[in-house]
Amino acid sequence: MTEFAKRGKNRIKRLPKRGHYDRETIYRILDEALICHVGFVEKGQPHVIPINFARVEDSIVLHGARASRLLKHIEEGHPVCVEVTIVDGLVLARSVFNHSVNYRSVVLFGKGRPVEDEQEKLLALKAITEHLIPDRWQGVRPPNRKELNATGVVSIKIDEASAKVRMGPPVDDQDDYALPVWAGVLPLREQTLSPIRDDLLSEDIPLPEYIAQYSR
Amino acid sequence: MTEFAKRGKNRIKRLPKRGHYDRETIYRILDEALICHVGFVEKGQPHVIPINFARVEDSIVLHGARASRLLKHIEEGHPVCVEVTIVDGLVLARSVFNHSVNYRSVVLFGKGRPVEDEQEKLLALKAITEHLIPDRWQGVRPPNRKELNATGVVSIKIDEASAKVRMGPPVDDQDDYALPVWAGVLPLREQTLSPIRDDLLSEDIPLPEYIAQYSR
């Protein structure tokens, strides 16, 4: 199945023409977004926490200290909502009302489980590391026994998901096109600046190509 | 009062040394973040929605279509959680375990109310527009009666809030400093690319300075 059903919580009601339900669109956005925002409920109170993540097939994996409240909550199988958003630009219209933002966002719903199997846990940690920066996993020291024991990993199966995308120029009211107002799009992008070497790094260790070439 | 009490839901339990409770730190992050992530609960289910916002004194203002589910929910006074995160860089350590992200995030809790007073509504819309791009409000067509009626605005008083900040180089285990692994920080920043003029824009309208100079 390459499309999520749109009958559930994931149905886009506001500006439905911006909605997408196909896995390709949704997974591309998930894979590009740097961090995600996890929503959960505790005693009726909503909480949102930003966290690193990765998508592994049809699931989202998260890691953290084993004792963390968020991980414990997810391990218990409570419903969670995971949201990511990439902002691509400011949409500057001729009227205040038609101002907007170009963006790509995903909202998904699911329930989590603890990842205890060591092989699966390592694969999840690798996925999270490589989600941040591809090719990093090879060549750094892998987790040792003590670190693995201290690290909790949860996997959230994506039950429902949708993407919302706005792109392109401003759309103004017909009468407003005559106004002497600059209109257009101011594109924004996550930019990489020059890498900062650790002061304690030996001078004979060169910058790897995958860091020099990094871009999102 | 310049500090939020840290006894509530806002208390940072995980890595407490990264926690901040002073308004100055919290408000600076809120004012810099482009969008926020609003968490709310509907029938026990957590939802997270990305949305434009602004801070107005000790409140967060949001706007949207008057009929939107999110606005209606907030207007009804249900508890909400608002989160923003600015990612400043990837922290590349010598071990997988010590990899991290430099970031500044805020999580706040409060309850909303509808903004019905026209003057207050206009001020909120101005704040949201200027949060996206300062100096834009002057010179674009202001909202007309019909647009104001179609737009809902809510104000969320910040009851509890905290910031979490990680900065600086990787912190590795003592034994790992001898490893031949490049370590340091890869800084990330929201970059502005060249503005894209609307195809329908008259050629004699120049790019305003506040757009040409825009940066976050």
Image (spheres, coloured by chain):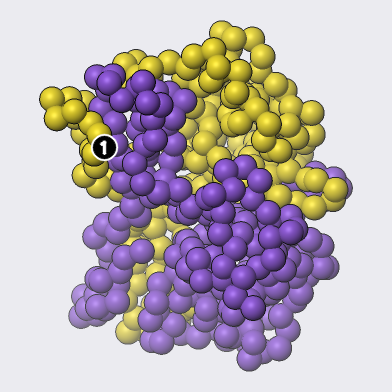
Chain colours: A purple, B yellow
The location of residue A32, given as percent across then percent down, is 44, 65
Residue B136 lies left or right of residue B87; in this view the side is left
Q: Pick out the residue farthest to the bottom.
A: A119
Q: Which of the 4 image quadrants contains residue A11?
A: bottom right
User: Residue A172 versus residue A182: which sits nearer the camera?
Assistant: A172
Quarter in which the N terminus of chain A is drawn? bottom right
Q: Chain of mark 1?
A: B
Q: Which of the 4 image quadrants contains residue B21?
A: top right
Q: Residue at x 78, y 45 (%)?
A: B41
- Is residue A147 in view? no
Q: Residue at x 56, y 54 (%)?
A: A19
Say which amino acid is labelled 1: Asp
Q: Residue at x 54, y 12 (%)?
A: B145
Q: Pick out the residue farthest to the front.
A: A174
Q: Which of the 4 image quadrants contains residue B34?
A: top left
Residue A191 lies left or right of residue B172; in this view the side is left
User: Residue B173 versus residue A206: which sits nearer the camera?
Assistant: A206
* Residue B90 to residue B70: above or below: below
* Residue A79 to residue B65: above or below: below
The location of residue B95, given as percent across then percent down, is 46, 78
Quarter in which the C terminus of chain A is drawn? bottom left
Q: Label 1, on which residue?
A: B198
The number of discs equals 1
* Residue B163 to residue B213: above or below: below
The location of residue B166, given as percent across then percent down, is 49, 53
User: Residue B135 versus residue B19: which sits nearer the camera?
Assistant: B135
Secondary structure category for the residue under label 1: loop
- Is residue A74 in view? yes
